[in-house]
Amino acid sequence: MPELPEVETTRRGIAPHLEGRRFDGAVIRQGRLRQPVPVDLGERIAGHGIRSIDRRAKYLLIDCSVGFLIIHLGMSGSLRILPAATPPSPHDHVDLLLGERLLRYRDPRRFGMILWYIGDLADHPLLRELGPEPLSEAFSGDHLYRASRGRRIPVKRLIMENRVVVGVGNIYANESLFLAGIHPRRAANRIAAARYQVLARRIQEVLRRAIARGGTTLRDFQNQEGKPGYFQQELRVYGRAGLPCPDCGTTIRQETIAQRSSFLCVRCQR
DNA sequence: ACAGTAACCTGTTTGC
DNA sequence: TGCAAACAGGTTACTG
């Protein structure tokens, strides 16, 4: 479910309900996520003002004055603000209590994380190695080109590496490579600088548009208000195997690249 | 350092 | 129709 636009949509949805408030505690029904949820999470977060809700890559960072909540949604996680009395469904693993309401974490596959961290976020092991935000000044075609030198991996893998650039997951990697006219399997070090300029712009465009549409709903992504995202209506190749390329009509192919489904037009992408 | 694979876990879709 | 296999938005740890 969540790539960068979905995480950003979630952040924007929950932030107004959290800023300036304070958590009362937590209810952990299932703490075995990708990393264990701290058993004393409720005591840690209780009673301290929530200063801000930020995002780095696909991590949500909630500043609780005395420490940070670091939340990752994994493949199937979601967060919603609900009335405190709302009964939990089977995969509603954690509630962060907010008085008359709560912030509920649901994650059927349990690939996500809820961590507590005291210290400088720039030093956190999960955050310190990350590359630039794709929508920041630090990200550019030059950056991609430099990162690609000496790398023989398929370009699709390169742009999905968090050390190179964060937040480009499988959907948007497929989409941006199509929009840039680059074959996803092309070796990263055999792409000219000028084409990386195009690719960087396409990555930014597709992410901006997806954020503006509230993310992509493939199966069941819902934002904080329980509404779906609408970007899937604008997907050009992702999930469209067997259908005609929107630009030239050639049948879109599905191939596996680096263990992930890839969709491409062999005529438009070289 | 780089490249490739397996693993984490469960729900849904696909294929026989 | 029923059942098992394949597959799914992410990331890390491990191997060669």
Image: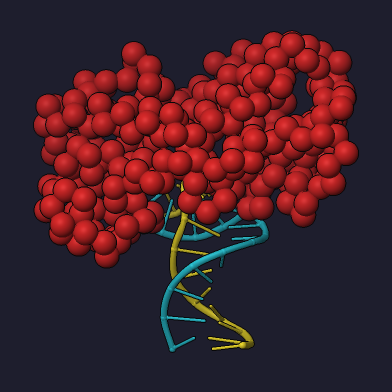
Chain colours: A red, B cyan, C yellow
Count the numbered circles shown: 0
Pick the residue in front: A74 or A103.
Answer: A103
Classify residue A11 by image quadrant.
top right
Q: Is residue A223 visible?
A: yes
Q: Is residue A225 left or right of residue A31?
A: left
Residue at x 38%, y 27% (from the top left corner): A208
Residue at x 50%, y 40% (from the top left corner): A229
Q: Find residue A30 and report its horizontal and vertical position in percent.
A: 79, 47
Q: Find residue A146 and report its horizontal and vertical position in percent.
A: 23, 24
Classify residue A22 by image quadrant.
top right
Q: Find residue A212 and report its horizontal and vertical position in percent.
A: 43, 29
Pick the residue in front: A76 or A39.
Answer: A76
Q: Can residue A38 be seen in this view?
A: no
In the rendered view, tell whether residue A4 sits above or below residue A16: below
Residue at x 55%, y 23% (from the top left corner): A55
In the rendered view, tell whether residue A265 sits above or below residue A157: below
Pick the residue in front: A85 or A203.
Answer: A85
